[in-house]
Image: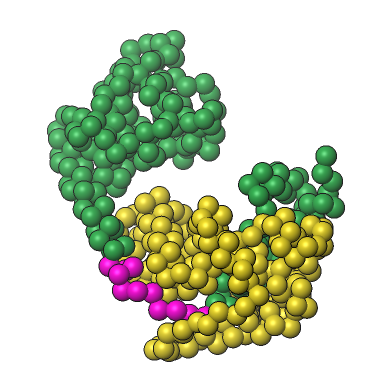
């Protein structure tokens, strides 16, 4: 990471090789469009490269940091574009995803991790899970979600906090392993 | 006025990116003075950070890496060529003035940041400094700004900054100042320091005397100012 900050293209390439797939997958999950997901991933990685963004190891893993940047970019894209209109119509449906074939142990471990987080999400009350997914992956604000679900804003905020609290309890083992 | 309980309720929305810009700013201001909300935020953060990991992995198109690396290689190339100019500058400076250790460090910073085109290259400009002559009776200074916004501050006629002290540059922008590298001057009163931060949209580059190692905020009024 230090070398990316110093403008070393090889260090940057390594960063992309390690985290590019997870970054693209998150962007794709959020916007549901490969071309837009590619644009968002490119913007995120170029912002890391151009601003020599500083990674603070005290704040978690490099992957968490990269994914946080992608998430912010995707939310910006969702909020300024028309993607929301389409997502609004399909938010209840489960889109079919085409998973890439497992090629390495690292990828296999990531798939296993993804399955664990998904099954933890599945144990949440459906209202909490849906609220969290609309906010995090849909890029909707709490007031938009309140309107969408026809619920008071306070209820929506409460579901987000309670849902995350439950997830945290379930995932504490996984999280501890990840940040070690 | 929003009370603490309201902010506590927003912790989840904040972590999920579901606050508007104005709400987020207000929440962050509240966090600074509220250990309880900070504690709740840190308690829930690991759950929010695991959400992107629930995503099914999709192979990115090869064009993504290709186009990224094209841009990165192109943007890294001029930096590498400027780096060699930095080395030439070091050669040029050496016979003119013997560099004290920290002076050499300042030149090393020039090389490290790859900004050494003193003549004002493509789109570059030279700006003269306003000097506080009661603090620096014989001093003068100028800022060489590169076309890409990187700059070198050169000073002459400078006294020693005093025991245990060094000179430090600052970039002023929107009423705030950002710390830049420190440097010392040679026995002949000359010195130079690279300003690594892009100064294209800055208001001024400032100079102060600071304890060795530098400060995060200036400890005196600027003794030399270059308005941009």
Q: Please name whichever residue, B10 or B220, is drawn nearer the observer in this view of the structure.
A: B10
In the image, residue A174 sits, relative to residue A24, either above or below, namely below
Identified at 36% across, 59% down, the residue is A4
Q: What residue is drawn where x is 38% and y is 34%?
A: B199
Q: Colour of chain A?
A: yellow
The region drawn magenta spans B56-66
All told, the count of numbered labels is 0
Q: In the picture, residue B203 is in which quadrant?
A: top left
Percent across and percent down for residue A99 are 46, 84
Residue B100 visible somewhere in the drawing: no
Residue B134 position by quadrant? top left
What residue is drawn where x is 52% and y is 30%? B174
Quadrant position of the N terminus of chain B in the picture: top right
Q: What x and y, as percent, mark residue B227?
A: 39, 21
- Which of the chains is green? B
Q: Is residue B64 magenta?
A: yes
Q: Residue at x 38, y 15 (%)?
A: B130
**Residue B46: x and y, percent?**
65, 69
Horizontal side of residue A54 vs B152, given as left or right: right
Can residue B128 be spotted in the picture?
A: yes
Image quadrant for the C terminus of chain B? Answer: top left
- Viewer-proximal residue among B103 and B4: B4
């Amino acid at each position: 990471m230090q070398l990316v900050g110093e403008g070393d293209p090889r260090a940057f390439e390594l960063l992309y090789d390690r985290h590019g797939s997870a970054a693209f997958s998150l962007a794709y999950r959020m916007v549901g469009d490969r071309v837009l997901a590619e644009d968002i991933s490119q913007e995120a990685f170029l912002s890391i490269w151009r601003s020599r963004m500083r990674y603070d190891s005290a704040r978690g893993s490099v992957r968490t940091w990269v994914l946080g940047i992608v998430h912010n970019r995707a939310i910006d894209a969702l909020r300024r574009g028309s993607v929301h209109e389409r997502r609004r119509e399909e938010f209840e449906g489960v889109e079919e995803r085409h998973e890439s074939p497992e090629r390495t142990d690292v990828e296999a471990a990531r798939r296993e991790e993804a399955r664990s987080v998904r099954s933890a999400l599945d144990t949440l009350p459906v209202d909490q899970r849906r609220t969290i997914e609309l906010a995090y992956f849909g890029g909707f604000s709490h007031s938009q979600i309140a309107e969408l679900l026809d619920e008071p804003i306070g209820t929506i905020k409460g579901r987000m906090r309670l849902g995350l609290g439950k997830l945290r309890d379930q995932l504490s083992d996984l999280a501890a392993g990840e940040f070690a | 006025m929003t009370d603490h309980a309201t902010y506590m309720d927003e912790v989840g929305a904040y972590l999920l990116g579901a606050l508007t810009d104005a709400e987020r700013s207000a929440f962050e201001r509240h966090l600074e003075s509220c250990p309880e909300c900070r504690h709740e935020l840190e308690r829930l953060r690991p759950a929010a950070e695991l959400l992107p990991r629930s995503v099914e992995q999709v192979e990115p198109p090869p064009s993504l890496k290709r186009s990224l690396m094209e841009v990165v290689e192109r943007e890294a190339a001029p930096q590498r060529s400027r780096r060699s100019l930095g080395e030439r500058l070091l050669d040029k400076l050496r016979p003119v003035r013997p560099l004290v250790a920290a002076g050499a460090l300042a030149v090393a910073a020039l090389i490290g940041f790859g900004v050494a085109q003193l003549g004002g290259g493509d789109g570059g400009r030279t700006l003269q400094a306003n000097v506080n002559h009661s603090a620096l009776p014989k001093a003068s200074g100028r800022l060489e700004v590169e076309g890409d916004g990187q700059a070198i501050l050169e000073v002459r006629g400078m006294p020693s900054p005093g025991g245990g002290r060094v000179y430090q540059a600052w970039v002023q922008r929107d009423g705030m100042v950002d710390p830049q590298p420190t440097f010392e001057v040679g026995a002949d009163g000359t010195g130079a320091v690279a300003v690594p931060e892009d100064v294209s949209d800055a208001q001024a580059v400032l100079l102060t005397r600071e304890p060795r190692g530098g400060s995060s905020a200036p400890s005196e009024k600027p003794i030399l100012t270059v308005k941009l």
